[in-house]
Image: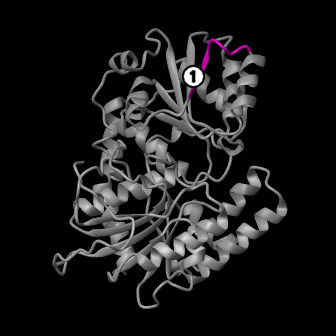
């Protein structure tokens, strides 16, 4: 996707081009800038922006960590007057400073009338509640319950309560909501008392030009220097409790006596890495597990294609599972636990690829079925076709656009 960029750090640059009646201007408020912040929420916003710009819309995107130059490997690397990136500062700065900067940058963005405002993270949205215009529709894309996620990771009750109150206050200001799955629609309704008539379920999208099937497994493994003679499992996950990597390691240890030539590649960073590495040693899995750390974004499609199977062992609060789409788009089948929105992605295509529960035993049973040849997985071409037909941003972005402008 060849697109262009105009970096504007304040309101000193004006855009004077005429906008035709079919083109709209959107203001997006995100958290971090992709690929500097390689999270699912950041990738979603980045790729949605790419698609809307390609369709000749205008986007003002405010986020933390936007680089001051075009040296990053972003696809938005040249000058384009339809996009303004407004840096909100450093993501690790003190909270009071971030709040002040958000308000300042928002007020300095210039006198450009947006047709719709789309919020993507409650913490960044909270400082702007009094500044949001009342005559422009405000939509929040609900990527996950911030307070509940913090509770899962063991934060204090006070911290969780304060986050919940902040979330509710932001949600009360929004006109409508986009969720990526029915499962997260239920959480938004049940836990935050958002009426169903304000909730629109639109799945996430995948960039099928970037995540594609263009290498054989052998070619992909050669590029990454991965083993050629082993069955490879791949899981790209942040190393936190709710992602279930510990359960996957336990399941793998239980299958190792039967299938010795298995190699698990784990891509991602997080606070549990040391504990997980210790678990690998205790389970005598050192020859079967590789922690890759942060995997550069340009290598991610290669890693999917190098694997025989992607495994997503999430334990809680998996709103959609964009990694499932990425894997399928690259032609690699995926198995997942029955958590959140993931079954909504996999069940119409390959229901046999969903484990019976989130327990290590259920993950083990599914892995053994695969490793023993008892589980018949969809072909590489079928995986690719399913993702491309149902989840390409070419199909998803117009649905998002329609809700934002409603």
Determine the residue located farthest toward the bottom in the rendered image.
135
Q: Seen in the image, is 175 located left or right of residue 363?
A: left
Residue 296: where, in percent of width, then height?
Answer: 44, 34
The residue singled out by tag 1 in the image is: 264
Determine the residue located farthest toward the front in the rendered image.
12
Residue 230: where, in percent of width, then height?
Answer: 50, 12
Q: Seen in the image, is 330 located left or right of residue 87?
A: left
Q: Nearer the viewer, residue 348 or 124?
A: 124
**At 52% from the left edge and 48% from the top edge, which residue is drawn?**
39
| Visible residue check, residue 106 | yes
Snapshot quadrant of residue 20:
bottom left
Q: Nearer the viewer, residue 162 or 65?
A: 65
User: Is residue 290 within the magenta segment?
Assistant: yes
Which segment is the magenta one?
A: 284-292
Residue 344: where, in percent of width, then height?
Answer: 51, 52
Q: Judge whether 12 appears above or below 320 on screen.
A: below
**At 44% from the left edge and 72% from the top edge, which residue is drawn?**
118
Q: Seen in the image, is 6 located left or right of residue 175?
A: left
**At 49% from the left edge and 78% from the top edge, which residue is drawn?**
176
Snapshot quadrant of residue 359:
top right
Q: Judge whether 4 appears above or below 403 on screen.
A: above
Q: Judge whether 304 appears above or below 103 on screen.
A: above
User: Is residue 17 within the magenta segment?
Assistant: no
Give neighbour class at mark 1: few <14, some 14-19, many 20+ (Cα, 10 Å).
many
| Visible residue check, residue 194 | no
Snapshot quadrant of residue 280:
top right
Dot 1 falls on a residue whose secondary structure is strand
Q: How is the image coloured?
A: one colour
**At 37% from the left edge and 81% from the top edge, which residue is drawn?**
406
């Amino acid at each position: 996707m060849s697109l262009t960029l105009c970096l504007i750090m304040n309101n000193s640059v004006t855009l004077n081009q005429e906008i035709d009646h079919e083109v709209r201007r959107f203001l997006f408020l995100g958290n971090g800038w992709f690929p500097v912040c390689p999270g699912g929420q950041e990738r979603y916003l980045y790729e949605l922006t790419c698609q809307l710009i390609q369709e000749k819309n205008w986007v003002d995107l405010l986020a933390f960590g936007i680089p001051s130059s075009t040296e990053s490997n972003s696809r938005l690397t040249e000058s384009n007057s339809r996009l303004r990136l407004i840096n909100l500062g450093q993501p690790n700065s003190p909270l009071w400073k971030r709040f002040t900067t958000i308000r300042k940058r928002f007020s300095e963005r210039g006198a450009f009338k947006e047709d719709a405002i789309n919020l993507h993270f409650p913490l960044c949205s909270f400082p702007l509640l009094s500044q949001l215009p009342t005559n422009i529709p405000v939509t929040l894309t609900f990527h996950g319950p911030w307070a509940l996620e913090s509770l899962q990771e063991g934060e204090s009750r006070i911290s969780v309560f304060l986050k919940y109150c902040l979330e509710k206050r932001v949600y009360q200001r929004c006109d409508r909501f986009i969720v990526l799955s029915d499962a997260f629609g239920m959480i938004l309704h049940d836990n935050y008392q958002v009426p169903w008539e304000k909730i629109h379920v639109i799945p996430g999208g995948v960039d099928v030009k970037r995540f594609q099937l263009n290498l054989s497994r052998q070619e992909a493994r050669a590029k990454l220097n991965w083993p050629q003679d082993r069955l490879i499992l791949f899981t790209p996950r942040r190393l936190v409790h709710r992602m279930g990597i510990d359960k996957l390691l336990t399941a793998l240890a239980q299958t190792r006596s039967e299938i010795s030539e298995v190699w698990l590649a784990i891509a991602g960073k997080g606070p549990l890495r040391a504990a997980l590495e210790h678990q690998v040693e205790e389970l005598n899995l050192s020859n079967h597990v590789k922690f890759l750390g942060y995997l550069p974004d340009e290598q991610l499609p290669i890693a999917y294609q190098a694997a025989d199977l992607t495994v997503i062992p999430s334990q809680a609060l998996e709103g959609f599972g964009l990694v499932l789409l990425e894997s399928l788009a690259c032609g690699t089948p995926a198995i997942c636990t029955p958590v959140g929105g993931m079954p909504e992605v996999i069940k119409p295509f390959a229901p046999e690829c969903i484990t019976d529960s989130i327990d290590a035993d259920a993950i083990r049973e599914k892995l053994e079925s695969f490793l023993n040849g008892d589980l018949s997985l969809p072909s590489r071409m079928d995986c690719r076709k399913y993702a491309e037909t149902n989840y390409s941003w070419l199909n998803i972005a117009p649905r998002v656009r329609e809700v934002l402008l409603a």
